[in-house]
Amino acid sequence: MSKTDLYEAPDYYQIDELLTDEHKLIRNSVRDWVKMEVSPIIEDYSQRAEFPKHLLKGLGEIGAFGPTIPVEYGGAGLDYMSYGLIMQEIERGDSGIRSTASVQGSLVMYPIYAFGSEEQKKKYLPKLATGELMGCFGLTEPDHGSDPGGMVTNFKDAGTHYLLNGAKMWISNSPFADIAVVWAKNEQGKIHGLIVERGMEGFTTPETHNKWSLRASATGELVFDNVKVPKENLLPGISGLRGPLSCLNQARYGIAWGALGAAMDCYDTALRYSKQRKQFGKPIAGFQLQQKKLAEMITEITKGQLLVWRLGTLKNEDRATPAQISMGKRNSVETAIHIAREARQMLGGMGITGEYPIMRHMMNLESVITYEGTHDIHLLITGLDITGEEAFK
């Protein structure tokens, strides 16, 4: 049974005044799409642990796939503030759906645009922008997560082509992806990106089951068993870890905005519930401890909104550092996960049901706090940036 989505976005500090009319138009159109297409069906798909593939066409139509990619390659040519707002609204609906869009735009389209040949850009980007082609990003391995430089996936020069071997795991979109941007080491141990297409012999994408988190998102592995990759599928514009890490910066920026969307949804749900739910003869919104929870939620959301707005301004000026993006990602997810837990408490037993979105957000955020750089690693990135001392090893 689908319910009407009554979401109203909090804006305690009139941050909308910092946005252009175009920013607000883009955000509101995505918000309307989420209310119509995502909210009515997402609880059901999440309960069934199934990805709603029918949403892909709509995500393409609202410009969620590679919004910052130039128009000549099929993108929308938007700025980074617009990209952030799109991710915020999609994750307000569901983190898994935002993951699908993030991977497509930041981890597949971005590296092809930034490091690909002109032929690769023209071949793949327009179809990725519409969702006609879907992609995934292969970096994390079974034994190498926070330390991607230790990867063992490799390729050898076989004359007319490369031979790719290895495996990647925890890959969003992999079960249905048409292409994978895979990072692997050559015979000299140098990391390069390769575009691997579904149908190449020896390339399989087994799905990951039994997840308690991101249940409405498709996650899987990438397995390469002597896959023949044409030499023209190598991304020529980059080598080394800088390639995949620059892609992760794009994705982490989107998460900084997106996780706040989940926080705002939990806050809005708790606020509305607190005004309707009566105990001891009055709405629970009138009790001090409930007001404390709500006041702290809106304070943290407001701080987060100001942080990502400033980060978006720096990103538009090409001045946002990887460490600043790390801080934004970490802060937003921590804010969101805390707000989700407090909101769940405010709803009491109803908070654990699919009647409300809070428990789904809370479970999803347990993945978001780990992927694209774990919570602890982002803390150490900030530590390195302010002290100059590396604590990773």
Image: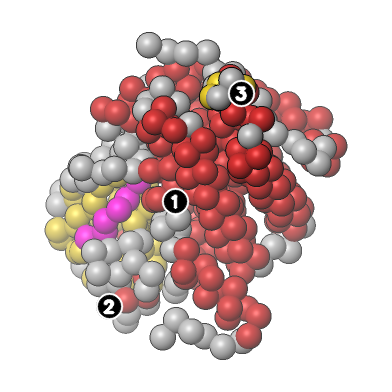
Residue in front for this viewpoint, 78 or 92? 92
Kindly check if marks 1 and 3 are in contact, taking CB atoms under 8 A apart as contact: no
Q: How many marks?
A: 3
Q: Residue 357: which quarter of the image?
A: top left
Q: In the structure shown, which secondary structural element does the residue marked by tag 1 occupy?
A: helix
Within 10 angstroms of label 3, few (less than 14), some, or many (20 or more) residues?
A: some
As shown in the figure, which amino acid type bears the numbered disc 3? Answer: Pro
Relative to 91, residue 315 above or below: below
As shown in the figure, which amino acid type bears the numbered disc 1? Answer: Val
In the rendered structure, which segment of residues is drawn in magenta?
Answer: 167-172
The answer to whether residue 104 of the structure is visible from this angle is no
Which callout, 1 or 3, points at the residue further toward the start of the chain? 3
Which color mode does the image show? secondary structure
Which callout, 2 or 1, points at the residue further toward the start of the chain? 2
**Marks 2/1: CA–CA distance:** 34 Å
- Quadrant for the C terminus in the image: bottom left
As shown in the figure, which amino acid type bears the numbered disc 2? Answer: Glu
Residue in front for this viewpoint, 149 or 11? 11
Answer left or right for 217 relative to 362.
left
Residue in front for this viewpoint, 54 or 198? 54
In magenta segment, residue 169: yes
The answer to whether residue 353 of the structure is visible from this angle is yes
Q: Which residue is mark 2?
A: 187
Q: Which residue is mark 3?
A: 283
Question: Looking at the rendered structure, which numbered label has been put on residue 237?
Answer: none
Question: Looking at the rendered structure, which numbered label has been put on residue 368?
Answer: 1
Within 10 angstroms of label 2, few (less than 14), some, or many (20 or more) residues?
A: few
Residue drawn at 37 percent across, 26 percent down: 354
